[in-house]
């Protein structure tokens, strides 16, 4: 079954064709990052206008790369949430229109579940069903959550951020340091030159309210807004000079606080589970990947990291989820509206 996937939940316009959930025939991602850079973050109006302009060309390219005609497509898949409402609507409307015009079934996919699935798209990754139950970490610019996957269609939210997402912590930290947007990639690079134990930044613990936050264990939740404030205070007390080598120490220490917070909670969630899947834009971070590998080796658990090309937002993971028979199908999908705040489960 060849599925054309469409993804427009944030600032990437993406289309891909995936066969039987795993075989990626094409994967086209148009990144809008340069449009949003001057504003220091994603501007929803710009994102949705850009999706409208470039999505038809991106879909054409995905079909061309896969060497397919419209008739060869067996079904369509699209992200219905979570994400920016005005961005989601563009992909969802396009997918519904194509499904009607081509008379093919539509599958509506939860973006966070797709980030989890992205760790299983590598050819040598195990089948998702074969490793259930397992733990998953989704870390991106908009989301940071820990999930238990009991079965391929049975996700359970165990913990999430109570304020900023991990990617936001990178982006806001980089803005404070004048490093531009997005902050993750540049901090990742600079941190390699710095000492990660130079400054002790807070590890983002969510405050306990009888151990629970919205029914989740507070020890599995994250809080990154205090880290950003702590960086602000540090910079006020120690203003860095231009080309100050100390800046890379600040970056490495700041990054370490984020990585440490993520890895500690993953370790906690692995009590009783022996597989951890990780996806989302922040999972591109080289120090995070290294620290997760170290932790997994120490605990003797299997770590499934999404391949770099599937970490950030992409449509292959959307078509992949649909190809596994997951997601919402048929008439129910056609009637779904964009759901900007839909949880992972
Ligand atoms: O998954 P993604 O492409 O889009 C969202 O759904 O948000 O993630 C984007 C986020 C941004 O915050 C960006 O700074 C972060 O991922 N990011 C990184 C790295 N590359 C991208 N964060 C840390 N290290 C990186 N190498
Ligand atoms: Zn995402």
Image (cartoon, rainbow, N blue to C red):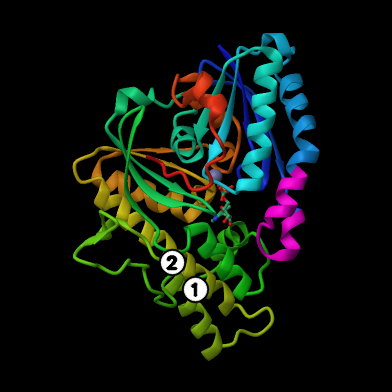
Neighbor class of circle 1 (other Cα within 10 Å; few <14, some 14-19, many 20+) is many
- Residue 106, image x, y percentages: 57, 21
Residue 109 position, x and y percent, is: 51, 31
Q: Is mark 1 within 8 Å of ligand 1?
A: no
Name the residue at the top extreme: 71
Name which quarter of the figure residue 210 lies in. bottom left
Would you say the residues marked 2 and 1 are in contact, meaning their CB atoms lie under 8 Å apart?
yes
Residue under the point 64% across and 39% down: 89
Q: Which residues are magenta?
A: 35-50
Q: Quadrant of the N terminus?
A: top right
| 255 horizontally vs 245: left or right | left
Work out whether residue 94 or residue 165 is closer to the camera in this orientation and state it: 94
Judged left or right of residue 270, residue 44 is right
Could you tell me which residue is drawn at 59 percent across and 87 percent down?
239
Is residue 39 magenta-colored? yes
Residue 55 at least partly seen: yes
Magenta run includes residue 4: no
Q: Nearer the viewer, residue 196 or 226?
A: 226
The residue under the point 73% across, 22% down is: 65
Q: Work out whether residue 263 or residue 62 is closer to the camera in this orientation and state it.
A: 62
x%, y% of residue 148? 30, 40
At 61% from the left edge and 12% from the top edge, which residue is drawn?
74
Residue to which mark 1 is pinned: 228
The kind of secondary structure element at disc 1 is helix
- Indicate the secondary structure of the residue bearing disc 2: loop
Circle on res. 224: 2
Q: Is residue 192 visible?
A: no
Q: Quadrant of the C terminus?
A: top left
Specify whether 73 is left or right of 136. right
**Quick check: 3 above or below 8?**
above
Vertical arrangement, residue 180 with respect to residue 79, above or below = below
Considering the whole magenta stretch, tell me its main secondary structure. Answer: helix
């Amino acid at each position: 079954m060849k599925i054309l996937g469409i993804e427009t939940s944030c600032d990437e316009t993406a289309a891909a064709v995936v066969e039987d959930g795993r075989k990626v025939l094409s994967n086209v991602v148009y990144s809008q990052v340069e449009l949003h850079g001057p504003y220091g973050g994603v501007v929803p109006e710009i994102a949705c206008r850009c999706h409208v302009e470039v999505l038809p060309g991106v879909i054409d390219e995905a079909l061309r790369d896969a060497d397919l005609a419209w008739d060869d497509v067996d079904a369509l898949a699209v992200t219905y949430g979570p994400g920016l409402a005005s961005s989601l609507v563009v992909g969802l409307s396009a997918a519904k229109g194509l499904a009607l015009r081509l008379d093919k079934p539509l599958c509506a996919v939860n973006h966070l579940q797709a980030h989890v699935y992205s760790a299983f798209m590598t050819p040598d990754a195990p089948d998702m069903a074969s490793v259930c139950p397992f733990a998953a970490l989704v870390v991106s610019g908009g989301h940071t959550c820990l999930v238990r996957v009991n079965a391929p269609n049975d996700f359970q939210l165990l913990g999430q951020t109570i304020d900023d997402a991990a990617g936001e912590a990178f982006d806001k930290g980089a803005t404070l340091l004048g490093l531009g947007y997005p902050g993750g990639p540049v901090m990742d690079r600079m941190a390699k030159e710095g000492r990660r134990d130079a400054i002790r930044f807070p590890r983002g613990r969510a405050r306990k309210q009888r151990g629970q936050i919205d029914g989740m264990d507070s020890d599995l939740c994250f809080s990154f807004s205090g880290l950003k404030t702590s960086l602000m205070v540090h910079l006020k007390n120690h203003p860095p000079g231009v080309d100050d080598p100390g800046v890379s120490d600040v970056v490495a220490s700041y990054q370490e606080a984020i990585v440490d917070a993520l890895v500690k909670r993953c370790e906690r969630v692995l009590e009783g589970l022996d597989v951890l899947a990780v996806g989302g834009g922040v999972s591109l971070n080289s120090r995070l990947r290294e620290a997760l590998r170290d932790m997994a080796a120490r605990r003797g658990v299997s770590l499934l990291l999404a391949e770099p090309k599937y970490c950030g937002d992409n449509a292959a993971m959307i078509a992949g989820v649909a190809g596994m028979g997951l997601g919402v199908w048929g008439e129910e999908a056609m009637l779904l509206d964009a759901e900007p705040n839909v949880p992972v489960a």
